[in-house]
Amino acid sequence: MKELIIAALEKSISSLNIDYHDQLEITRPKQKENGDCSCNIALRLASIVHDNPMLIAEKLVANFSCPEVKNVEIKAPGFINFFVAKDYLLENLKKVLIEKENYGRSNIGAGQKINIEFVSANPTGILHIGNARGGAYGDSLARIMRFCGYDVTSEYYINDAGNQINNLGESIKARYYEICGQDYHMPENGYYGEEIKAIAKELYDNYQDTYLDKDLEFYKELGTKKLLNNIFTDLKEYGINYDCYTSEKAISQKYDLKEIINKLTTHGYTYELDGATWFKCSALYDDKDHVLIKEDGTLTYLVPDIAYHYDKYNRGYDKMIDIFGTDHHGYVARLKSSIKALGNDPDKLEVKLLQLVRLIKDGNVVKMSKRSGKSVTLKELIDEVGVNAARYYFARYSLDTQMDFDLDLAKSKSNENPVYYVSYAYARISSILREKDITEIPEKFATLNNEDTYNVLEKVYAFPEVVKTAALKELPHLITNYVYELAGLFHSYYAKNRILTENEIATKENILLIKAIRQTIYNALNLIGVIPPEKM
């Protein structure tokens, strides 16, 4: 409807021979008496045509033609308010019922190839709530962008090489030797989680002390395989399945890492100092330089990361989105610098930094996990509140804001719990539809004509635009906010209006109305990885 009004206004402006090419802004008035839509174009044109805004508005309205608009009013100091015929809401109701799970889908991203990399936790432990937040954001964004026609690849980067994997192998080996009654020192930066002990214990339970002669490579491979399996099992339960898994080992085999450094050198971005090779990223986006090759000839962890992003560019993505923890903010400048230094466009890489999460229980911050001894794990969170609540709560907030996750609220069966509030709307409609369902869509709706109906239909109508905005601005929380408001409008409608009545036509149309509401709730929740319950 906004697009139709904008098109009609542009024709009106053109008919007055006014040279104006900026985007017209159509807003929704706070007061119903000011119409369904409003525009301040007359005020904006006043300085261009040097005329009174009220007179400009009158001229624009005189040349305005849009069949969907039944009335236009001008309000001082020059606002144009539009009152829209409600037929379009009823036509859209048919659209929802016909398109079903495709309602809200668009092709605004057609032809654009997007890579979204998220979670990518090192296989040295168990996923924690920070990973849960990043996972919810990344997977929701991928779902939303696919729904809008983007060619999206969701990717997990596996850090299966480097010093942290050496320490992992040493840690497992030390625990295994300990169980076997042998001495083996834990490395300085070893891993002390219960999952490390569990791997060593399983090894002993199956083979006793017969693996004491195994070299470090055995323990590294064993630990990486076991912990990656745990990670991907938890992510699958969380509703996340990746399109692509890329390992650091594979990147190191695909590219000669020294050759990539040589390419940086050729472009003038390395130098030698104190026996080490340095990346001159301070000449680009960073505030200091970083070592690529140490004195002893070994590569730093930065080199395979540079190669990994070089590989992403070679795969032809139009845009790459990396989701990091806020503690990696300093790493962004290094990556952008390497991209530029290798001759690629650094603006194609966008890095999202997820802020911290605090878990609250009984009014207090939860600090420790009885399982890992360090932080609450994703698996523990799922077991505590369920996948729906976890996904919904993390999707409620913009990624760049710190958030509190109230465990008690997330589990409560009350309207104060937003995921319960939205789920109850869906389940309530499902209950009615189990009692009576209608599939035939009438040519015209005869009874859906009160204000409560129009209010909820307007919110249903807004869904495709909300989805587009969420995709373009990369803000999944817009979907969560939307579906909460839609559920609220349904609850309000249900409190004031009977669905099953003595009037057969009214009953059928009411059923079709709530069926469209239910479909829209489902489509919205599906975009954030929430599966609503049929019964509650």
Image (cartoon, helix red, strand yellow):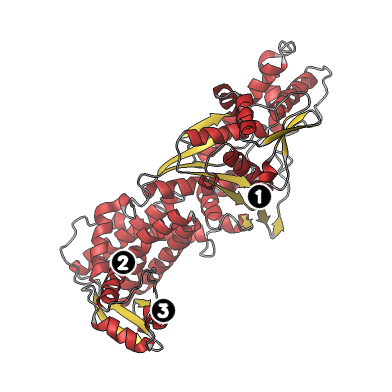
The answer to whether residue 427 is visible is no
Q: Give the SS element for disc 1.
A: helix
Residues marked 2 and 1 touching at CB (< 8 Å): no
Say how many tags the image has. 3
Query: Which residue is identified by label 1?
Result: 326
Instruction: Give whichever of discs 2 and 1 has the lower sequence position.
Output: 2
Give the CA distance from mark 2 to mark 1: 39 Å
Mark found first going from the N terminus, 3 or 1: 3
Q: What's under tag 3, amino acid-wise?
A: Arg
Give the mark nearer the N terminus: 2 vs 3: 2
From the top left corner, tell me how far across and down residue 78 is, in percent. Answer: 38, 85
Q: Secondary structure at mark 3?
A: helix
Viewport quadrant of the C terminus: bottom left
Point out residue 220 in the picture as x, y percentages from the top left corner. 67, 22
The residue shown at (41%, 88%) is: 77
CA distance for labels 3 and 1: 41 Å
Q: Name which residue type carries label 2.
A: Glu
Mark carried by residue 3: 2
Quick check: marks 2 and 3 in contact, CB under 8 Å? no
Residue type beneath disc 1:
Thr
